[in-house]
Structures are given as C-alpha cells and as structure tokens.
Image: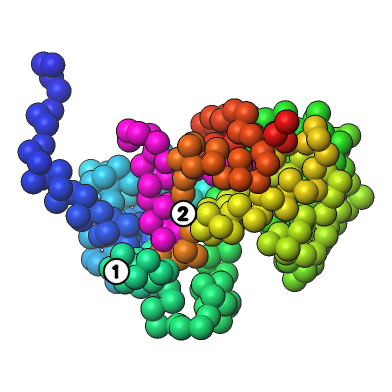
Amino acid sequence: MAGEPPALPPHAVLLQLANGATISRCLALVADLSIADQLKDEPKDAVALAAACQAEPDSLYRVLRTLAGVGVFVELPDGRFQNSPLSDVLRSDAPGSVRGIARWIGHPMHWRILGDLDYSVRTGRPSVLKDNPGKSPFQILAEDPGTQAVFNEAMTALSLGDSAAITAAYDFSRFGRIIDVGGGHGTLATMIARVAPAAKVVVYDLPHVVEGARRHLDGAGLGDRIETVGGSFLDSVPGPADLCVLKYVLHLGDDRAAARILANCRAALGDDGCVLVCEMMIGPGPESVPARIMDIEMLTGPGGRERTEAEFAALFASAGLELKRVIRTPLPIRLFEAVVRA
C-alpha cells in the first residue's frame, strides 16, 4: 500500500534477528543500571545518568542511542533521554515490570547456558550441566546466591503477571479445596484466595520452599486462609482436592516426569475433580513464538520442554484425565483444564 515503508530484503531481516543478542545485552545492562527508574520523573542526558550509576558517559550514551533506535527510550533533540512505553515497563515499580526478567536474560550465567546450546543439541542434555556433571540445574543455581537472587527476581515478576492473567480468566470460586502444586512462595495461591474467598487453598512444594511461603502469606494477612504443606509432587499430592493447579511445573521435566506428576494429582482428586495446567503452548504461526523461545530455555536449563495441545492431551490421558478445554489469556500463558476421565 502507498505510504508503507518498503519490506526489508531477507538478508536484512536475518541480520536483524542475528543482532538480537546485542539488543538483549543492552536491555539487561540498562535494567541492571536502573536507567528507566532514573527517567521516571524527567528526561536526563547521558552525563547525569552515568554519574548516578558510575558509568562512562559516552559509552552509556551509545547504548541508550541503540535502544532508542528500536523504541526503547526516546532521544530528544537536545540529547536527553526519556522513557518510552517500552522502557516504562523496565521501571522497578511499573505494573508488570520486566526489569527482573531482562536482568536474568542478560546475566552471565544465562548467557553461558544459552551459548552452549550446541551441547544440548548434540547430547539432548541441558547445557547448564556441561561443566557440572553430577549436579542438578537448580543445585548449580543455588551455589551462587547473587545469581539465584537475580533468577528469583525474574521468576517473581513473571509469576505476578501470569497469576493475574490466570485468576482473571478462570472461575476458581466453584471449588472447595484447591491445591497449588509446586506453588513456590504462594503468589498464585494468594490471588486465588482473593478471588475465591470461600475456598481453602493449599500451597504444596518442597519443605524449604514452603517455609518461605509461610512467611509471605502471614505477611499478606492470609495465614488463616492458605495452608502450606511440604513434600515432593514427584512422590504424591496431598488430597482430598477439588482442583489441582500446576503453573509452569510440567514444562520443567520430560514426559515421564510430567505424567508422574499428573498421576499424583489424579490420585488426590475426587471423581468430580479438575486439574488446571497453566503453561505456554506450541502452536502454528507467530503467536507461539514466546512458547518456542521458552522451549529452548527448557532445553538448555532444566531439561524440560513446551508442548502442543495434542501433547498435553496425551499426557492427561496417560494419567486418567481428559483435556476438556484450553482457555486463552492476554499473555502467552494458556490454561489447560482436565477432568477425571469417566
């Protein structure tokens, strides 16, 4: 159509994709330096920004100029920078902030894991294990408290956004006892308890994890509404339950582990019970690009995978469950509702 910019030739498009690593690293750096936070109230130039974060002004300017070229920040005619709609969500206090996620994606450990993708492709094993035989991915992460803190911040930010989308898209009020399987520190359980005030909600995770959840829940004033139970979902799930919720749990493992977890959920349910799996879904077209990228994260990190709708249905069937429906949300996460198979 007239007035539209000409389409880029294939080599230019491919070069843009190949150079995505540079943009990603620049994003992680400005997230680390809290640049978007500094620009919350007024535009500033690179000299002022560099002074606040102990950077070299010209080098920082070049990074900001690059990001402004792709819509992250706005460079004003006088050389100052201000936030754009994209950089606004890099602020620490922004609703749905992606600052923590950007920091993790550009963190040296994540950089090394992704850089060793060839190891995963050759061996089928997580690349994080390449130089750490005999350890699990999460053991490796726990050995560096600073790195683990960056990772936890990213996962908390991801959980907050996804949990809000889940509770907006699904009716939890029809269930009496809800088990948040692998519920971490209770972010999703807290939101479920607020939208389903009559339900008894249980956070089920490893004992050392639920210790942290208990402190979080007591601080939120929900200690009497939400129970915490320690254990391994690979061994069992505490029943009786009307609904078992699994958010970003099944994708951490292979099909064998996922089927085992679902079978344990089935054993905890009554005949009218449900399982709600909250994960991304591999599908046709560009809509599933976030899921395909997450699939590479699972390949190189914990050794899990993202799945298609048919693959989810097969997993449910192997555990005596039937996929009833797939519920969309505004985010890439999908809700897979399964019922006990008659």
Alpha carbon separation for disc pair 1 and 2 = 16 Å
Magenta region includes residue 164: no
Q: Report the number of discs.
A: 2
Q: Residue drawn at (11%, 16%), measured in percent from left and top?
A: 2
Q: Residue drawn at (25%, 60%), measured in percent from left and top?
A: 22
What mark, if any, has residue 305 been given in the picture?
Answer: 2
Instruction: Residue 240: give x, y in percent of width and height.
Output: 86, 46
Q: Residue drawn at (59%, 59%), measured in percent from left and top?
A: 257
Res 83 seen here = no
Query: Quick check: marks 1 and 2 in contact, CB under 8 Å?
Result: no
Res 173 seen here = yes
Instruction: Residue 93: give x, y in percent of width and height.
Output: 57, 50
Specify few, some or many for label 1: CA neighbours under 10 Å numbering under 14, 14-19, or 20 or more: few
Q: Which amino acid does label 1 sit on?
A: Arg
Which sits earlier in the primary sequence, circle 1 or circle 2?
A: 1
What mark, if any, has residue 222 been given in the picture?
Answer: none
Instruction: Residue 33: give x, y in percent of width and height.
Output: 43, 64
Q: Is residue 320 left or right of residue 75?
A: right
Which residue does the numbered mark 1 point to in the structure image?
122
> Bounds of the magenta span?
276-299
